[in-house]
Image (cartoon, rainbow, N blue to C red):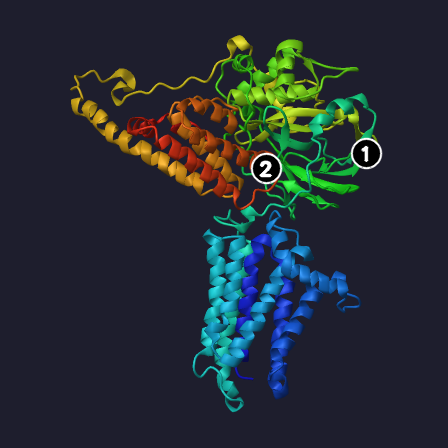
Amino acid sequence: MPGRSTALCVLLATVVAGLFFVPVFGVAPLLAPLLVPAAVLFVVARLCGRTEALTAWRPLLLLLAGLLAVIETVLFPTTAAGLPTGETVSALASGVTDSWQLTLQSTWPARPSPDQLLFVPLLALAAGVLGTELVLRARKPMVALIPSFAVVVVSQLYVALSGLAAVAAGLGYAAVVGALLALSRPGAEKPASRRRRRAPAFASGVPVVVLGLGAAAAAGMLLPAPGPAFSLKQDQPAQVSGRVTGPLDDIADRLQHPDVPLFSVHGDARPDRWPLVVLETFDGVNWTPGGHYRRLGAQLPRSPLVSVPSQERTATIRLGDLDGPWLPSQTWPAAVSGADPLVEESQGSLWLPRPAGEYRLSWWEPQVPVADLAAAAIDQRAPGGLGAIGEPPADVEAMARAAAGGLHPGFQAALTLERFFREGYHTAAGPGLPSGHGWPQLRKFLIETRRGTSEQFAAAYVALARIVGIPARLVVGFRSPAGPAAGGGYTVRNGDVLAWPEVAVAGAGWVPLDPTGTTRLGGAGGPAGLSEVTAQARAQLPPAAQQHDAPVAPVRSSGDAGGAHTGDRSFPVLWVLAGPAAFLPAWLVGVPVAKFLRSWRRRRRAGAGAVLGAWLEVRDRLRDHSVPWTAGMTARDLAAAARRLGNPSIVDGLHALGGTVDQVLWSGDVPGAQAGPEAWAAVRTVRRGLAARGPRLRLRAALDPRTLRYRE
């Protein structure tokens, strides 16, 4: 059969192209779904070549045989005695329409379930059938590689490989292409009478093919998947169904019915608390959770926020009367078996609207030395740690700075703020428990009653921490009950409900604190991990009178070393004059250019980021024109402050932007494609209004460098 060796290379090229999805699914789940259909296509192509009557039907036969091979390797649970059923056909249709998108909505490596994996062998099958026909009919081997190269391009939209992984995968594909070139050169295929002379050509291609397959597989097995510079996954979060009552609102009610069992825990790990959901957005009235959920894949890697060694822990959770869509989890979940939840990667929250019954959870537990934690700095990279807090009362802002001891933001300041609550406030008990967590309730708690549940303690701590620049977030969950575990497990009840703050610490990630002083260290008789280390750092905290920031080392000039140099020095007149001479043009050019680049970066954001960028751009431009702004101001608040500029178009633009910001950032809905353009259209309206203020005011605003120093 002419061209059978080149057809084999084309099919192997599709296999190698499919292996470019290894960072998404891993090597083992892809091998059979790619190799078996390719082998079936090669056998069917050879059989059709021996019977001239079948040549015209070859594309259809290849497609049907390949689909059957895909069904048997991927969809065998939906078959009856190895034969396709109606469920099989439905699964194939879903593989064409939904599989690719479900994978984008998953954390990677994704679970190799048929509903996510199916699109990869289907892509390789389509490329293999088309490539085989091109090489056998048109006899243009290089044109026949176009379908497999298209599969490579699609894989790069999922994970844009870089570094050694990209080199190894590229060499694997190039090796197969080289074999195809060697086998398709003139004289490589001879009639049957001269078959012995063809053997060297085929033999020269086989090692190259094997090398190509090995290099492509090694790219996935031996090299870590790099962080993609681009991926469609970034804009494909999974959809969560509807809005539900926040668990923060349920704390007072749960405490009134403390004996209701919620879930039981079995396993060797004994964490002191079980997070349920993280709340990081506060508008002055309500705390809301994050909404960037993804399908939980095979295993989540260690977080890049944690640079210290981490140990994997496991436990089995059996749900009882716990309602709501969130599952008990840990800060850094690794994997879940027995359930298929969505996960908020930056928060660790697990979302599952349907009851799971029982599931096994594994998580990463950072191992932080006490000395390192006590002297640690805060982590400004942590997402959501310095989010909005509405408009705090003026007396609360002053209280926050005093409560932190005047220290710079750091873990010592965070512990000092925790001690402020522990020593000056009381946990409420009995009937008539206080409820509410908006600024009216928090101010009453902070200034007047000084009595509340963990709801007020945690919400007030996070708000005050953000005021003084400490990244913090609010977590609602449950403490582990006191006492040893009975029968290898323990039961968590309503009375164990707890809200607590977490602060972002460099190297350790999110560290839980305990402003109420009611968390039971060691959980149900076991080690508490990070909370135990935090307790030791808390015990080492010096008294308030002895607290101070670390001193800055003085800068010594080269002539001060050892005090030995005492010779005369000439006064550096030229250097003194060169400083102002260089500063003036740097200011006149650098400040406007820096503001232009900042605006350009904000416009290039996607989704909700574009709306947030528009809000930051308007805020900074109005501050350049001396419009007062304070932390927690909304777009409408800023519109009221901007009325003094006397231009109605500025106010109109801010009101339009405020509507878009509320819809995208606070409603919980996924932003539409027009949200970003609408927000930046409002920015242009505000800019046109500011442009009417005259050249002198515009020049002063363009050269004002103060807004460049604020962190976004």
Where in the figure is residue 269, as x and y percent of width and height? 72, 34
Where in the figure is residue 588, as x and y percent of width and height? 27, 31
Q: Which residue corresponds to the image point at 62% horizontal and 82% vertical from the top-left?
A: 48
State whether residue 152 is above or below residue 480: below
**Image quadrant in which you'd find residue 516:** top right
Relative to residue 657, is residue 50 drawn left or right? right
Q: Amino acid at mark 1?
A: Asp
Q: Earlier in the sequence, mark 2 or mark 1?
A: 1
Tell me, yes or no, whether the two marked residues, 2 and 1, touch with CB atoms within 8 Å: no
Can residue 133 be seen?
yes
State whether residue 502 is above or below residue 244: above
Compute the Cα span from label 2 to label 1.
Answer: 27 Å
Q: Secondary structure at mark 2?
A: loop
The residue tagged 1 is: 321
Q: Nearer the viewer, residue 169 or 559?
A: 169
Relative to residue 201, is residue 35 drawn left or right? right
Q: Which residue corresponds to the image point at 47% horizontal and 62% vertical from the top-left?
A: 171
